[in-house]
Image: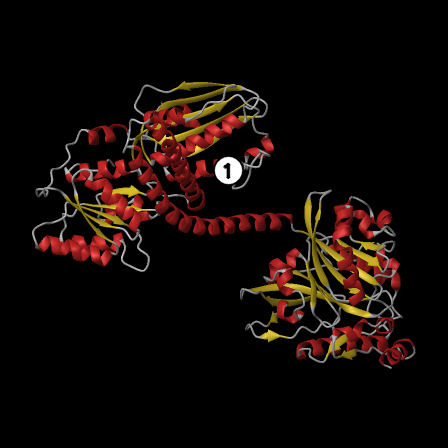
Amino acid sequence: SGPLLGHHLSTIYHVPFLYLAISPTELQDPLVLQSQPHGYVLRTCEDSELQATLTLAAESLREREEARPTSPVIASSSTDAEATIVTDLAGRITYLNTLAEDLTGWSLAEATNRPYQEVFRLVDSQGNPMAHEPMAPGRDRSQPATATLAQRGGERLPIQERTSSLTHGDGSLAGLFIAFGHHHPAISEAHAPDRSSNGAAHGTAGSAEGEAAVPAQTQAHLAAMLDAVTDPLFGVDGNWAVTFANQPAEHFLGKPQQVLLGQNFWDQFPKSVKAENHEAYTKALADQIPSAFEFCDATRGRWMEAYAYPHPAGMFVFLRDITERRKAQERASKLEKLESLGLLARGFAHDFNNLLTVLLGNVSLARYAQPGERSYLEPLDAAKHATEQARNLVQQLLTFAKGGAPITEPVNLNDDVVNDVLSQHKPRPHIDYQVELTPHATMVEADPGQMRRLLENLLENAEEALLGGGTLRISSRIVSTTDPLRTQMPANLDPQTDYVLLEVHDSGEGIPDVHLDKIFEPYFSTRSDANATGLGLTVCESIARSHSGFLTLDSRFGSHTTASLFLPTLGQQWQSEEVETAPARRRPTNNPPRILVLDDERPIRLLMNLSLTKDGHEVVETEEGSETVAAYQQALEEGRCFDLVVMDLSIPNGMGGAEAIQQIRHVDPEVVAVVSSGYSDDPVMANYEQYGFSAVLPKPYEPSSLRQLALRLIKGEESPH
């Protein structure tokens, strides 16, 4: 049989031989492994794989015939780390250290199982490919060779390289070991340190020089080469006893090799590592197939990647610290989730905001139908409050997921935000609330809804820190251009602008220092209750940035926490704009005023019609942009132009407000139009004037907001901005 013939070739004639198999399962027979072949070739292998395997086998035969009396002396730099590449018997790459990754441009994951000539590409002075002949007759393998490496990106790098064959403890050829580095004018020969007591003495590796080689010297050279590998490398036998450990492995485990030899490999790691990986490693050893695994070393707090390379006498295991890579993957995964959440939230918010517009509108209309009956009003007020909470949740989700482009207007931070939030906030009995607001004007350009959400989140965080009672203080002040506090503010802020500072301070437990640099990260939370999402401060920080401001957190563990919001003030610019007289309309209004409505949702059109007709307006409804344009053109031709147009921004499978307003403005530049949408983060909503609109009305809204805006625009008053 094949295994018996192989045994005779190996033990009697000392001839290298290869097994040719149809499938890998044929190579798993114990007799096949015991016959000690010099390689394995599948009938479906590539030509390059067959050529490399035959070349190495032929070289092994030549070396046996020459029976050199001494093993080669391999030059090695005594100070600089070397790039190293390890191949299997077929010339396929099984390992690169990090320096080899840098010099070749290939990562270990990309290079593994590729023919080494594809990664370690040598070229001549003209850039033409050159063959790498590590075993060529006449080459002095004790000296490094000068060559030019073609890096993956196309650059050429002068190098000095030296190549040695790797063998198993029984003398059978295992592969190639290539060491290389930047070319220097002169490289001195340096003999490797004597580590003859190391794992090489336990039969894990040897020289390719055959039985006539000097074992101790060969083992010393191989040990020196393996110590040059910058990652931890272990050799284990079939019973998982450690037979070799290079110097990085000693450093990683904190044990010298003399202590590690003979110990069980799995005992060097937490029990969970063996429980999760032992079966896979055992299968790799039994199948004689190189494998890669990842595991978490909880004792050392590190994630490791293990590359297992079986051989008949056991296995080599390379370890690589991938903790930073895992952290980067987790961060990338979070960002990917945020992007997916943003897309989901945007579509969800549009449809939900349309529904909330109908709910909020009809509840409001029903509430004012019979304003005197208390039993009638209480449930309606509860329904309205719940609808407003749902609106806030949707807007908070949008702000977190997409950044939530704010729809800004002049806002008094004290009156429109702090006092408004506190008037609806239910205080907790064990907390002492203190409010210290500056008497000066705190005008900022802001989205009032987003500012309220920011303050509500900060209040909730402060209250959660005061479960055992304490003081919660809300304060505001103006930070002028000469205020000493500006030294603590970012240097890239406008030195000519005053800022409003809003602070929420609590005397709670504070935040540990180890958590302070993570507080604005998505999903991070120091709270353990089921409602802790870790999104609150992320939303707050996003809102602050979108308003050209910033949010800081000062906390001392066991003492206090202070959240500080800085926003640029409007100052004199707002005051001068406030006293300007709004320009009068250029043409008289109709009697009654005529309003053209565009919305694809019939319930919303009905709500708008009911709300606007209460004030005596004539309302014309359209559900697609082209209908709106045609209706406006017809009214213009008849001399009964519309006084106001209210447009939905997005119309599925039809023309929306942004395109319709451009066509209307082409025939009537004096059109007065309002844009409305459930997509509150759309740039048209944030910059409506640039798109030809006179005002903006985000969904959901109450009928009173629509009626007040319509009255103001029809009278010729500009929307606040």
The image shows residue 313 at horizontal and vertical percentages of 85, 64
Q: Is 380 situated above or below 19?
A: above
Left or right of 190, for residue 445: left
Q: Nearer the viewer, residue 403 or 254?
A: 403
Task: Look at the numbered disc 1 and give the secondary structure of its residue.
Answer: loop
Q: State whether residue 708 is above or below residue 95.
A: above
Q: Is residue 516 above or below residue 201?
A: above
Q: Is residue 86 visible?
A: yes
| Residue 144 placement: quadrant | bottom right
| Above or below: residue 203 compared with residue 448 | below
Question: Which image quadrant is residue 651 in?
Answer: bottom left
Q: Three-letter amino acid code at disc 1?
A: Phe
Residue annotated with mark 1 = 520
In the image, residue 426 lies at what x, y percent?
44, 25
Q: Toward the viewer: 180 or 370?
A: 370
Horizontal side, residue 523 vs residue 452: left or right: right
Q: Residue at x 59, y 74 (%)?
A: 129
Q: Residue drawn 85% across and 69% down?
A: 171
281 vs 493, left or right, is right
Residue at 61%, 67% (x, y): give it: 148
Count of labels shown?
Answer: 1
Q: Position of residue 663 (x, y in %)?
A: 19, 56
Of residues 584 and 99, which is closer to you in this image? Answer: 584
Residue at the outermost right position? 12
